[in-house]
Image: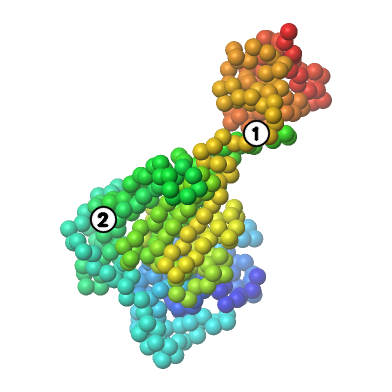
Amino acid sequence: MSETNRIEYKSALTKDLDLEKEVVAFLNYHEGGLVYIGIDNTGTTLGVEDPDGDMLKIKDRIKHNISPSAMGLFDVVSEDKDDKTIIKIIVASGSEKPYFKKKYGMTEKGCFLRIGTAAEPMPQKMIEELFASRTRNSIGKIKANRQDLSFEQLRIYYQEKQKPLNKQFQKNLELVTPQGDLNYAAYLLADVNNISVKVAKYKGDTRVDLTESNEYGYVSLIKAAKSVLDKIDIENRTGTQITAKERKEKRLWNTIALREAIINAFVHNDYTREIAPKFEIFNDRIEITSAGSLPEGLSESEFFEGFSIPRNKELMRIFKDLDLVEQLGSGIPRILESYSKSCFHFSDNFLRMVFPSAVPVYEEPAQEKPKDRLVDGLVIDLVKDLVKDLVKELPDTQIKILNLVSEDKHITISAMAKKLGTSTTTIDNHIEILKNKNVLKRVGGRKTGYWQIVEQE
């Protein structure tokens, strides 16, 4: 793969490499970009000798040599390519353009823009225009309406990740305004705030019959996000759909996509409107709504491709520190692996994600086989006919084994163990008991034989 408008190759990290220039150019570019260390400009993989050391140097250089702060706007990861280790720097498009090298300030020597496959000096007129239109109402610039804030919850979360906060954490995490006051990001992350975060549940497909409303707000946004993740994970039960050929078990919503959607709503919500994300569960879907339209300069197609202009870079940085965000720009592509673009609804003021449930939230899954019956939640249609009243005396695991055998007489013990989420030893033990009760027998050898349920008199 050759260099493009979004991809830059560098052979090695050296003192002479103007890394800051490349990063600044991507920060000022509306699509952001990727810088690879360990690949030459022909695309040949060279690798790096000390990836961990180089990654620390890269983070340090970007943190200290670029202004405005790029924290929360970049990610540095190592990857294996052609049996060699390389470094990938993921750079998002910043919302406080123009970005520049601190050494030269907002001049043509300090400001760069990605044009084609090169980082070109930015004309002075463009620098002045970008500065004049720079976002000034971000949560990092707004002074918190309370300055008596505590951060014990945040300290605990960082401590759990072996990243203890020092006395300078408010400045290091960019929780203060340029004037030195605690900012709105600090207010959101404080132990106590006035941000309400609710998970609502409705009986039907509309908002008429509210059956449950749980409040998880008024605490650190990290704690609120974790609480919402836990609550919705509980609601995301496993549904069973029985057809003439098989018994399918799947959760109401894809767990990976659902988690990404929840985190995306928290991180990219427009808190300057003092509106929190909203989570609503209906009988046929879940809706996740966040305030704010697409960031200025980002189209829908770019949004779906994973291009990122973080609205709240301070939150993005902290969510990533605490492993709630895995990699910059990875959330939307992960959601699209399970749900279509039609699940996203954009308006001037909100973004809503709507994920249909695999089976109705409140109702039992449809059963297509009219002979099916349920005993203790287990399917025993054919099994019931064969083993008669004896089924009432069998443990759940043994009934499940008989169900699997009735669906596939050639099923292996390892396949049973995998389907039932247990060990082959456990399956062996239960099969031995069923054999002793003359309920199940093996006809033929281990490789060519099959299972047979013994019909009871």
Q: Residue at x 32, y 75 (%)?
A: 136
- Is residue 119 visible in the rendered structure shown here? yes
Q: Residue at x 37, y 45 (%)?
A: 213
Please tell me which residue lies in front, 380 or 2.
380
x and y percentages locating residue 17 in the rendered image? 48, 76
Question: Callout 2: 10 Å neighbours few (<14), some, many (20+)?
Answer: few
Q: Is residue 11 shown left or right of residue 325?
A: right
Where 383 falls versus 129 (above or below)?
A: above
Res 82 quadrant in image: bottom right
Q: Amino acid at mark 2?
A: Asn
Looking at the rendering, in which quadrant would you find the N terminus?
bottom right
x and y percentages locating residue 42 in the rendered image? 64, 75
Q: Residue furthest front?
A: 208
Q: Residue at x 48, y 76 (%)?
A: 297
Please tell me which residue lies in front, 332 or 321.
332
Per the model, the C-alpha gap separating discs 2 and 1 is 47 Å
Residue to which mark 1 is pinned: 367
Please tell me which residue lies in front, 363 or 171.
363
Q: Residue at x 43, y 44 (%)?
A: 209
Res 165 label: none
Residue to which mark 2 is pinned: 194
Where 218 falls versus 249 (above or below)?
A: below
> In the structure shown, which secondary structural element does the residue marked by tag 1 occupy?
loop
Looking at the rendering, in which quadrant would you find the C terminus?
top right
x and y percentages locating residue 122 in the rendered image? 45, 87
- Is residue 159 visible in the rendered structure shown here? no
Q: Is residue 231 shown left or right of residue 371?
A: left
Res 266 quadrant in image: bottom left
